[in-house]
Amino acid sequence: MTKPAVSALVPLLAALALGAAEKPADGTVTPGGALTPAQQTFWNDAQAGGATAEAQVAAEAVYLEARALYQAARFVEARERIEEAIRIYPPHQPAQQLREDILAVLGLRDNRLKQAAVWLGNIQDVKTQEMAVRMAAKMAEGEKQMAAGDFAAAELAYDSVDIALRTFPYQFDWGNLPADVAAKRLEARAQDRRNQLERQQGDRQRAEGLAEERRRMEEEALESKVDEMLRRARVAYDRKDFKRAEVDAWNAYELDRRREDARELYLKSRRKGHAQFDDLHRENRLERIARVHEEVHKSLIPQSELLVYPEDWQRRSLRKPSALGSTGEEPWMAAINARMQVPLEFEFEDASLEDVMEYFRKVTGVNIIVAPEVFADGSGTITFRAKDMRFREALKWVLEMTKLHMALQNQAIFIAKTPITGAVLLRMYDVQDLISPVRDFPSRELAYASGGGGGGGGGGFDLFAGGAIEEGTAVDPDQLAEFIKTNVAPEEQWGEGTALDNRGGTFFVSQTPEIHARIEELLANMRLQQALQVHVNVRMLDVRKGFFEEIGFEYHDEIPATAPPGAASGLINASGTQGYERANTTEHYNGTLGQQLPGNQTDVAYSAGSNGQFRRGLAVEGSWNIGSFLGVDQVNAIFSAVEEETDAQVLQHPALTCFNGQRAHCSFMNQYAYISDYEVVNNNLDPTIDVLTFGEILDVRPVISSDRKYITMEIRPSSVSLVVPVFVEIIQAPRVVGDGGNGGVVSANTFGFPIELPNVLVRTLRSTVMLPDKGTLLIGGFGKSLRQRVHTGIPFLSHIPFLGRLFSRNGSYDENRRLFFLLNAEIVDLGEKEALQ
């Protein structure tokens, strides 16, 4: 059953409590205040009169009495009186309403709060009535929240009603309302708890679902990652990259130990990788050995270019010398220097310094600060005209005319009467390369005067003598420092606060940035000039072209080398007498009589061996041989025929690189040890061994011209070669066996002691020439030509046609030889070479 709203009853109770009949002065009774339609009907009926009117009046009186009892909280008596009023006049609506309120107060109706509100309105307790209205609103709100499912809010609303009931200021009979409110509050709490549990259960289920979904996604991601790694491993395995396959398979197995396929692939790749390594190791070993041989052969290839920079030169060129602090130009200084390059056009006619500086400020936008004492002392006037002149040069001219000084400092150009030292910076400069001396290395000169003859016991001689190393003159660092101070800046700019100190080949300079820039430029130019080198090579070209021919018979009485001593041979007599023989106690000489051609023809062309004892060509010789079928005449008859044509070009090409102005040399020498003499030791001859040095020497001193286009060269090439065969002289002497005293025994026979007398071919050149850079100059030469025809034979018989060949020997010799000295020099400029990289 729908209950009437409490808000609808409150105005009615208030109207009943406050309504009263007022009688005007004329005696007419009118209701007091505003009446409701029901009250107005009752009033009208009462005014009409009759039985109904009497019943109404009686009921109204009883109603008013019951109402008074109700307001006095005498609810039982009020109930009896209101029942009486309704019995008298049942349609009495106010009585019916009051009856409902009394019954509500007595607990005979459900809406206790509405009745309490009506009752409170009747007793005109507005504050408590407002509390009852709020309690009713809270109850309605609680029911609304319960219906909406917000059990926590409903519990709060019911709890507020419960607190209000317990703190109500009147002892009102609430009936079952407190129990109902408590029950509803407990029900709301239980429902709220149930909802919380349901929400928590739902949250747990959702969390479990999310966790399961996340786990599933992670599992899928892990599976996808492992599958991808296994796919890469299988691809690597298929292309026989077992090492990569092993790594990928192991990483996949590390991620998921449940994947047996990853483990199997890992083990399989590992086994295959070991087998492949064994196979590749053999191949790599052979390949590396081949590479080693290739590197060896590559190292044997001569360098064709004069200078080769390393492949990583770009990285090496970034190296910078060590410096104190920051040596870079600050941005503001770079901006001012850039503006000082701006060309200007101006015309000053008796202008003051202040006007000139103001013009420069406006045109260039550079901050120019002039010291106060400059204007205080008066700077005079300036007359200056210029066109297309840079601002830097124009400012220098103005300062020169006014005898002022400037400096860049603190983002401005500062001008003063004295040199400015405010912008002094300390920097260090390593000048070890400039003060270190360049040593000269002269070659050893040929000593043509021998020390002694063979008979004098000093048969050996020193072919090369003299020529010690010349120590270069070191540059005094103090002189270099004085040179820098004198030429870089005037003396007044080396005032207080500036310095140039030498510390072990390093200059520590305290100066302005402008002076530092000049010092750097000067040292850079000195290094470029000192770093110039010259590559010199001399080609000694020996061109030979020769022809010779020998044919004929030779007759002689020479004893064969295999004949025993005293054996008979030769055509002179059968007793074995040789051509001549001379013997004494110290020396023994012998010789043979033979038909020989002259020895002034070339020897190298047809002889070979260390001493030239082997002849080339065709030689048919009958020699002394016991088992031969040749007669005595045939034994001593020798037939020889030889022909040779020579076309040779011998090139000797020493090369050398040295600094500009440095004397240097290179030598390519051989040594030949020989017996030059004998010394008597214990009555016997002890040989003296000397060493002959021969080869090629190149001695040069290049000087580069200032324009680096020409080279003035002092050149001294020398070439010494050993002439073969080496002449050997045999001396005969007896030997003493024993201690050399009275107990010594002198042998009856003499023994031969050889003495070697080597001959050398010396070719030297001394000259000073000038040639262009990378040019070639013929600085000398030597020519030799030989044309010779020789005929030897027996008179008359050798001239018989055809038969004369049996009694003669003919030789034809042609030799042409030319020696050239070619000089080539090239300037090695490292800066220029580096720019070409």
Image: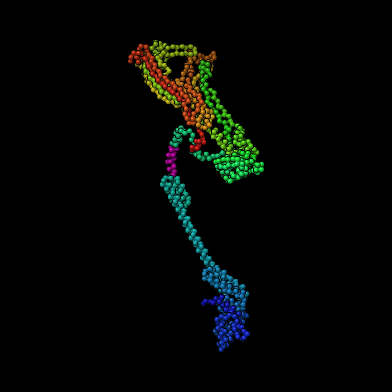
Residue 114 percent coordinates (x, y): 57, 76
| Residue occupying the point 55% across, 68% down | 153
Whether the magenta-drawn stretch holds residue 690 is answered as no
Q: Is residue 447 above or below residue 296?
A: above
- Say whether residue 285 is magenta: yes
276 left or right, relative to 81: left
Q: Main secondary structure of the magenta part?
A: helix
Q: Which residue is at the far front?
A: 349
Where is residue 586 drawn, in percent x and y? 49, 13
Q: Position of residue 490 (x, y in %)?
A: 62, 36
234 shown above or below 122: above
Q: At which x and y percent is residue 363?
A: 57, 45
Q: As drawn, which residue projects farthest toward the left?
A: 802
Tally of numbered discs: 0
Residue 271 in sight from this viewpoint:
no
Name which residue lies at 49% across and 14% down.
Answer: 733
Asked if residue 148 lies left or right of residue 644, the reply is right
- Residue 765 appears anywhere in the view: yes
Q: Is residue 268 above or below residue 299?
A: below
Identify the residue at image location x=50%, y=60%.
207
> What sort of colour scheme is used for the picture?
rainbow
Q: Does residue 413 appear to the left or right of 559 in the view shown?
A: right
Could you tell me which residue is drawn at 50 percent across and 36 percent down? Answer: 832
Q: Which residues are magenta?
A: 273-288
Q: Nearer the viewer, residue 114 or 516?
A: 516
